[in-house]
Image (cartoon, rainbow, N blue to C red):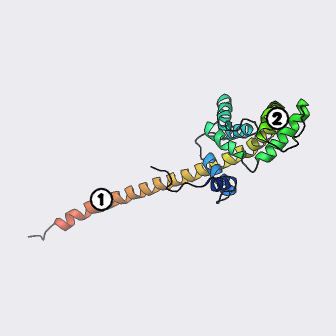
Amino acid sequence: MFRRRDPVPFRVRLREFLSPKKGWQRGYRYLGKRMQRLPDTPHRIALGFACGVMASFTPFFGFHFVIAAALAFVLRANILSSATGTFVGNPLTFPFIAAASFWMGRKITGVHFNEPHHGWTFGWLWDNLDAIFVPYLVGGLLPGLAASLAFYLVMRPMIAAYQNRRRSKLMAVAKERVRQAHERRRAAKEAKQAAKKKGPIQGAGPAS
């Protein structure tokens, strides 16, 4: 019922995924606004976002939302914010995340392999999965923790400042509405009193 009449070709969808027409910056700005307006404390929101960032450094592609939600649940962070944090891992950042995690993992674990002579193929990756998955998983812990901590330290005061400004604006609006309501009641009361004073004078006839 709600499907497009003309399906979008795969290459168009892939290009839109890698390079959105409206740009990544606008998308991140929108996500930031949505996250700042979450009804929770700055600590829980920032911690949830950090959980999403940490999940983006794991090799469990396709399960980052689940991992982020699990971390947020364990740490009592905001789960919706954790889902937003996973967008730190995207087609623009994954090459750098994977390269840093894999390089560090090989240094820590000492796992090495010979690069394929006939190019990187799915079959070769599957045959060498243990030599790729374990270093990626181990090597992603340290940069993931560093990135998560950095995002938490930056975002918590930003969210707190935004919530304070928003709270001040809402209080100012509420006070203005109360003042206007008070003015209307006072004006109605004065009009009623004036009507009572004018009533006997207008109703009195000439003396006989």
In the rendered view, does 15 fall on the left or right side of 111?
Answer: left
Q: Residue at x 81, y 37 (%)?
A: 124
Mark 2 burial class by Cα count in 10 Å: few <14, some 14-19, many 20+ = some
Q: Which residue is mark 1?
A: 192
Q: Residue at x 58, y 41 (%)?
A: 39
The type of residue carrying mark 2 is Ile
In the rendered view, does 147 fall on the left or right side of 80?
Answer: right
19, 175: nearer the viewer: 19
Q: What secondary structure is found at the residue carrying circle 1?
A: helix
- Which of the numbered marks, if any, corresponds to residue 132? 2
176, 137: nearer the viewer: 137
Q: Is residue 19 above or below residue 68?
A: below
193, 58: nearer the viewer: 58
From the top left corner, tell me how far across and down residue 171 is, in percent.
55, 50
Name the mark nearer the viewer: 2 or 1: 2
Q: Residue at x 65, y 44 (%)?
A: 84
Q: Residue at x 88, y 40 (%)?
A: 115
Q: Quadrant of the C terminus?
A: bottom left
Q: Is residue 138 above or below residue 3?
A: above
Question: Which residue is most to the left?
Answer: 208
